[in-house]
Amino acid sequence: MNCPFCGEIMAEGTFHDRGDSYFLPAGETPPKLWTRGVLEKKRAVILPPESFGAPFAPRPAAFWCGKCRKLLVDYGELLPPTP
């Protein structure tokens, strides 16, 4: 895959972290306690895999551009369709 920002070839892999993966909207402060209820109050989008569900869930594909230092993560097959 080529980087959509600079056009360089991106390295492919998977996305992992040390806790739950989620996107927090601008203006929200990170929670001190990570519970589903706290994250929902902060309008967080909880991304799989999550510790609230199966701990061995599949990891999303990811692509890293070393030049731009940008990471693209593909959740297309892991999130339910938007209604």
Image: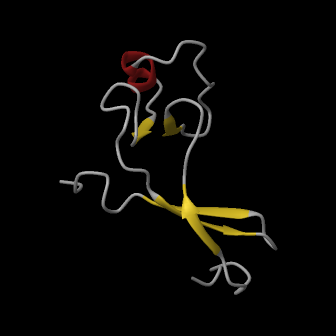
Q: In the displayed structure, would residue 20 be above or below residue 9?
A: above
Image quarter of residue 72? bottom right
Of all residues, the one furthest to the front in this rendering is 56
Q: In the displayed structure, would residue 35 be above or below residue 8?
A: above
Number of marks drawn: 0
Visual colour scheme: secondary structure
Tell me which residue sits at (40%, 40%) in the image.
49
Q: In the displayed structure, would residue 12 be above or below residue 28?
A: below
Tell me the quadrant of the picture where the C terminus can be found.
Answer: bottom left
Image quarter of residue 60? bottom left
Image location of residue 30, percent across then percent down: 62, 25
Image location of residue 58, percent across then percent down: 37, 49
59, 80: nearer the viewer:
59
Q: Is residue 30 left or right of residue 39?
A: right
Q: Is residue 32 left or right of residue 80?
A: right
Tell me the quadrant of the picture where the N terminus can be found.
Answer: bottom right
Tell me which residue sits at (59%, 32%) in the image.
18
Q: In the displayed structure, would residue 45 be above or below residue 69?
A: above
Image location of residue 19, percent across then percent down: 54, 29
Image location of residue 11, percent across then percent down: 65, 73
Of all residues, the one furthest to the right in this rendering is 67
Tell me which residue sits at (69%, 78%) in the image.
5
33, 17: nearer the viewer:
17
Image quarter of residue 51? top left
